[in-house]
Amino acid sequence: MDFAKLKTMLDARQPGHTLPQGFYLDPEIFEFDLTAIFGRSWIMAGFEAELPKPTSYLSFLIGRSPVLILRDRAGVLRAFHNICRHRGAQICPVGRGRVPRLMCPYHGWTYELDGRLIHSTRMQDDFDPSQHGLRPAHLETIAGTIYVCLADDPPPFAPFREHVQPLLAPHGLHEAKVVAETTLVEKANWKLVMENARECYHCAGRHPELSKAFPVRRSKAEYEGTGDLSNAFRAKMEERGLGVGPVSGEWWQASRFPLNDGCVSLTMDGQPSVKMTLGQVGDGDVGSLRWALEPHSFCHVLGDYAFMFSAMPTGPLETIVTSKWLVHKDAVQGVDYDEERLTELWTKTNYQDRDLAENNQRGVNSVGYTPGPYSTDAESLVLRFTNWYCERARSFIEENSGQSNARRVN
């Protein structure tokens, strides 16, 4: 990437406005994003419940980089680059499963669950297996959730844990299970997908089902926890021993907020979709705890279920959206919940958002596109996201200017 060109484009951005067109179209900027943004950020990988027993694994992609999370025989979680140290083949397919050891499907090189190379045939006498173990990645956990970072020097994680752990822990995600997962291909740049995901300015008109329970006209002040409604909700939650927030850092934010009157869950009718509550939440009428990470995710945990949204770039004009739903580990399909009812609201919302992002992309593609202004009230989190992106891009340019071989995530 021509850093001088990119810096000029960043300098051209008018404060409070969307990005110049190239940020949503240019293949070179897409490659830059894989390296400078996704290659240096904490990424939410999923939940400890997805690796319930020793020898469990979870395999997924960050951009084009295969990543593997393992629970070893002692129950310790570990993260590795999911590529063989021989000729770089991907070891485990994307998904979840259990393996006693890791065997590359190409030439059979075999690794222990701690990443050590333990079998490699027909290598020369001076070959040293100890120098060819799997490359580790940084891994952290909070209250049953898992995060990874591919950077050598990741952003500080401790403030995120310190502030989010107390909010999330009462929801008992260690005692949950993933019961549904979907993937959706969106023909739009990942930044447009995430801009859409960071605001509800469009929700009243474009998400009639979500609007039943979700406070779609929530203002910036309400998000920040001020006003009579927020104060009353805060007092109610504190009586139940639940934190509200909001709390935030450079690349994350979290807060608990009330749902619309008469609604206790984010479902089509605002009523619980699971008979068993999730965690220490009393009758389950605890609003929604939302936490979100730049650059790619947001989650909600209600009294009865949890939901995760993750957007991963796969091309300049393509993004894969993955969604997961969790319920109490003892909940039985057809008895305690119905999967279709559990997933219906967010599935409808995801498809609606896909259409909005793709329509947005078609407009941004136009020769008539010029950056427009954000609403500082209705789009405060979009503005935060875009400002964060620009700051991270500038930081990477400053750190790597003059280096001809900046590390790429691929």
Image: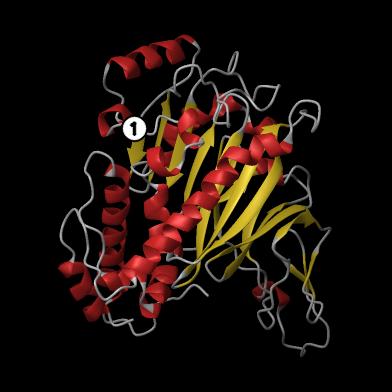
Lateral position of residue 4 relative to residue 215, left or right: left
What's the coloring here? Answer: secondary structure
Lateral position of residue 12 relative to residue 286, left or right: left
Q: What amino acid type is highlighted by mark number 1?
A: Arg
Residue 284: x percent and y percent?
Answer: 58, 18
Residue drawn where x is 58% and y is 32% of the image: 268
Number of marks in picture: 1
Lateral position of residue 379 relative to residue 208, left or right: left
Judged from this view, the residue extending furthest toward the bottom is 124
Residue drawn where x is 70% and y is 22% of the image: 276
Location of residue 2 with respect to 283 vertically, above or below? below
Q: Which of the 4 image quadrants contains residue 83?
A: bottom right
Residue 407: x percent and y percent?
Answer: 43, 76
Along the viewing direction, whichever of 266 and 105 lies nearer the viewer: 266
Residue 81: x percent and y percent?
Answer: 61, 66
Location of residue 99 with respect to 291 vertically, above or below? below
Judged from this view, the residue extending furthest toward the top is 239
Lateral position of residue 251 relative to residue 239, left or right: left
Q: Which of the 4 image quadrants contains residue 86?
A: bottom right
Location of residue 281 with respect to 384 vertically, above or below? above
Along the viewing direction, whichever of 378 and 84 lies nearer the viewer: 378
Residue 408: x percent and y percent?
Answer: 45, 76
Residue carrying label 1: 217
Residue drawn where x is 37% and y is 44% of the image: 202
- Dot 1 lies on which element? loop
